[in-house]
Image (tube, rainbow, N blue to C red):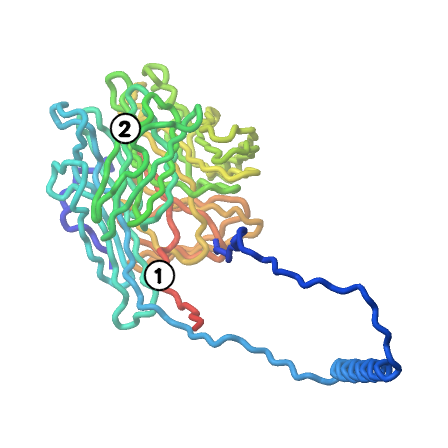
Amino acid sequence: MTGTDPTHDEAAALPDEPTGTEFDDDADLTGAAEPVSSTRRPVSAKAAARVGARVLVGVVGISTAAAVILGATFLDVPFVNSEPPSTVVVPVPTAQQLTCPGPLLRLSDESGAEASSVFTLGEANTRFSSTSGAVEQSRISASDAEAVEPLAAPLVLSAAPDTKSPQTLVRLSGAQSQSVAVGDYIGFTSAGCRAVGGDSWLVGGATTTGRTTLISLTNPTEVASTVTLDIFDERGAVSAAGTAGIVVPPNGQRVLSLAGFAPGVTSPVVHVTSSGGQITAELQQSIVRGLDAGGVEIVGATEAPSKSVVIPGIVVTSLEGVQALRGTGTETDDLIAAVRVFVPGEQSASISATLTSSEAEADPIRFSLDLSAGVVTDIPIEELTTGAYSLQIESDVPVVASARTTSALLEGGVVTATDFAWFTASPVLEEDTQFTVAAGLTAMLNIVNSDSDAIDVTLTSTDGDIEEYTIKPDSVLRAPVTNGTSYTLGLSAPAFASITQAQKGFIAAYAIDPQTPGSSPLTVFP
């Protein structure tokens, strides 16, 4: 059953060692030895006879033992295969839980005052669905952000196990969207609701002039979380006070300005690790070019460092519009489509990248680069024409990556709307997965088959509509999906998937995650 946050019926209009025993070195390990005489005594014949008898008995004993051992060598000894006793225990099924990022945030209030404080900006429109039928909703109760609207806080979705069939896997999915047009904040965002974790890589944002990037850390658990931020940029690791020991309270949210740690940074990457309660982490970026708003975006966590990275959908809405925007605007470096890549660790990387168009007749774009370790690199791709692409990066060492494009609506030679989107790398989907399409703009499902064989795809909506597709090897499927609807995605082989939304100069995207793991049987040994 598909659910809708009932409070969002009037959401803003959307633009269509072990230890060992130690010895005491000072212990007295010596004793007083008695003197030994060197005088030899003669041996009688009787004594010699006794000695000979002892030797004979010893030889007989040794021969007998050898015979016993030799005999045992050729005896059939039964083999016993003993396995330790064990018991298979099936844990009580637990509720599936996802956290949605919540509304857009900004520094300062509506009047521009209190520039060091964080305020919410409107409300998000959330859609969700569970195969068990019921979804419990709750709001994060403690936040650094002052809520301007009554329900402006991250939303937590929970789906309890099926009471009639407790061992049945319950699938839960959700996604949110928000359209905003307030002052310097004009644009559209969408994001998937995600499961908590202890390790996240955020690849996106900037803190140069006109670029504001906030870090949102949400803890929906009942245990406080202690977070560490490792920040890297185009020069390497960023050293800043306050990046360790960040406490996120139970059922709470911390919102931090990235510029407070790394000002004037063009290409940041943030590695978020937590202990205690697990969290979800996102970036929120907004852009102002001169006096013109340049869009907003929520950037979810990208796939963990890997030697093979896949970004299923990168959308260029209007190359002509972007070129016009570059010709008239200021501070336009981030208008160009780009791929951001970071090489963790101390070993440099050699990467090869392939951009595949969704248009079957288009030739792939390929390039190779050597990248320095510990440094973030933005790779501009100016030759991308209007259309949709998938990106696959192969590297000799693990890397993380995301891509960025700008959207622009050109009407009568004038750019009337502009926005931007970050496209994160997707995790591999190896089994049937449920996902939800955010409400708002025209949406497309992007699926990448990076295998050498074709794969079959079945797409089933909660309404029962079924679509079937076959994706050729090393190809991408781009299929329309309905806004606000949940689907089950069936795959005959592993693949990668995302949702992209674009319309009238606005754009957003988010990756589709694998099904949240539930309880599974455990083998217990006494």
Q: Amino acid at mark 1?
A: Gly
Q: Which residue is mark 1?
A: 518
Q: Quadrant of the C terminus?
A: bottom left
Which sits earlier in the primary sequence, circle 1 or circle 2? 2
Question: Horizontally, is 68 left or right of 196 in the view?
Answer: right
Name above or below for residue 195 compared with residue 402: below
Give coordinates of residue 275: x percent, y percent: 33, 47
Q: Residue furthest right?
A: 45
> Left or right of 228: which side holds 381?
right
Tell me which amino acid carries mark 2. Answer: Ser
Which residue occupies 86% across, 77% down? 43
Q: In the rendering, at what x and y percent does residue 65 appear?
A: 76, 82
Residue count near mark 2 (Cα–Cα under 10 Å), binned few <14, some 14–19, many ≥20: many
Is residue 118 visible in the rendered structure shown here?
yes
From this view, report whether residue 75 is shown above or below residue 310.
below
Residue linked to disc 2: 286
**Circle 1 — which element?**
loop
Quadrant of the image occupied by residue 119: top left
Query: Where residue 321 appears, x then y in whole percent?
Result: 35, 23
Q: Image quadrant for the N terminus?
A: bottom left
